[in-house]
Each structure stands twice: as C-alpha cells, then as structure tokens.
Image (tube, rainbow, N blue to C red):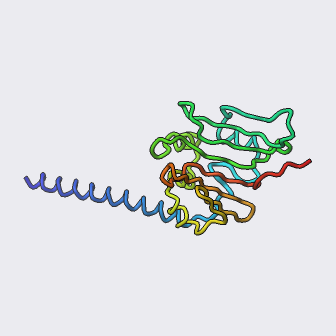
C-alpha cells in the first residue's frame, strides 16, 4: 500500500512537472518572439539577404515550378514550392542578372497551424522561430514590432536597413496573418 501511495505521488509530481515544462517552453517561445526585430529578418527560413538561387536550392531542393519570364523585359524569375497535396507553401523571386534573391513569400495552406508549411521547413532542417508569425493575430504582430512603417487594411509593413517585412492579415481570415513577405531588395526596380 505504501508503495502504491509513493507511486501515485511520484507520478502526479512528474505529470505536474511536465505540464510546467510545457508552459515554460511556451513562455520562452513568446519571450524569444518579443525579442525579435526587423533586423532579424536578414535571414529567414534558411536563406539570407544576398544569398543566390543556388543557395536556396541547397537549402530547400528543387522548386515544384519555376517561371523565368523568358522573352520579356522582366529581370526577375520566381520559384514555387508546394506541399504534398499540391498546395503552394511559399515562393521566392530572384534577379536573373546575378541570381541574387529578391524576396520570399510564405503563404502556406489554410489548415490549422499551417502544419504542412511548418513540416516542409522541418524536413529541410530549417527551424526558424520567425515562421511563428504565420497564423498569428495582427495585434500580436504589432505588439512585437510596434506600429508599422506603413499599414493598409490587411497589411502591416515594416522597413529597416534595406529589409522590408510585410505581414498580410486579412479581415476574411479574422485578422490572422496568412502570408509573410520578406523583401531583401525592396520593390525590385526594372533597369533599362
């Protein structure tokens, strides 16, 4: 009987401690998110500003689709990555003249928690806390970064040091961020 009581007390303590560990982990993640600045988007999801097309391929593998805009005056090309059910997870644009990355647009799919998007990056060995902004309420994003440089009805745009980050949080999705765009070469200009 004494062994049973000890076993129950120890089990309850482990269960209680486990719940506390999960809560501490959530609090730590929130603390890490609130410590971020726009400067931290110098790198995003395994690539960095000034990386090239080949760098992206090395991190994520070959894209599911590529549009190089042959026969046009456009100086950029786009790569698209898809989930296992054909849903677009993200796209990437690069300058065709020097193959430098211009921007990444993470869209993900609308399932709860953007699971397929998170799983894709996890399978690539990419663990970036900034992906947590996908699926986050608009007000929470503002609480992390403050008032945006520019705000429109569904967009929060932050600019700093040659980096622009746009969070799309449309009303039809309850103000939840359903796209994150990181521009390293903001509004790439076509040069004649």
Horizontally, is 109 left or right of 72 in the view?
A: left
The quadrant where residue 148 appears: bottom right
Residue visible at 9% across and 55% down in the picture: 2
In-front residue for pair 172/157: 172
Residue 136 rendering spot, x and y as whole percentages = 50, 55
Residue visible at 24% across and 59% down in the picture: 13
In-front residue for pair 123/164: 164
In-front residue for pair 88/118: 88
* Count of number-bearing discs: 0
The quadrant where residue 66 appears: top right
Residue 192 rendering spot, x and y as whole percentages = 92, 47
Residue visible at 71% across and 59% down in the picture: 163
Residue 168 rendering spot, x and y as whole percentages = 59, 53
Which residue ends up furthest to the right in the rendered image? 192
Residue 140 rendering spot, x and y as whole percentages = 50, 62
Horizontally, is 30 left or right of 164 in the view?
A: left
């Amino acid at each position: 009987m004494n062994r049973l009581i000890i076993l129950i007390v120890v089990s309850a303590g482990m269960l209680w401690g486990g719940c506390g560990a999960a809560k501490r982990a959530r609090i730590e993640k929130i603390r890490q998110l609130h410590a971020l600045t726009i400067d931290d988007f110098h790198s995003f999801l395994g690539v960095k500003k000034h990386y090239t097309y080949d760098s992206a391929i090395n991190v994520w593998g070959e894209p599911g689709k590529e549009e190089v805009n042959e026969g046009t005056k456009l100086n950029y090309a786009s790569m698209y990555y898809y989930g296992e059910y054909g849903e677009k997870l993200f796209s990437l644009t690069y300058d065709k003249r020097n193959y430098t990355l211009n921007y990444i647009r993470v869209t993900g799919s609308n399932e709860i928690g953007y699971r397929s998007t998170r799983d894709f990056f996890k399978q690539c060995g990419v663990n970036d806390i900034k992906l947590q902004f996908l699926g986050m309420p608009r007000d929470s994003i503002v609480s992390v970064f403050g008032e945006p440089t520019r705000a429109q009805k569904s967009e929060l745009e932050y600019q700093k040091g040659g980096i622009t980050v746009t969070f799309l949080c449309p009303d039809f999705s309850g103000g939840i961020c359903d796209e994150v765009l990181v521009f390293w070469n903001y509004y790439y200009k076509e040069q004649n």
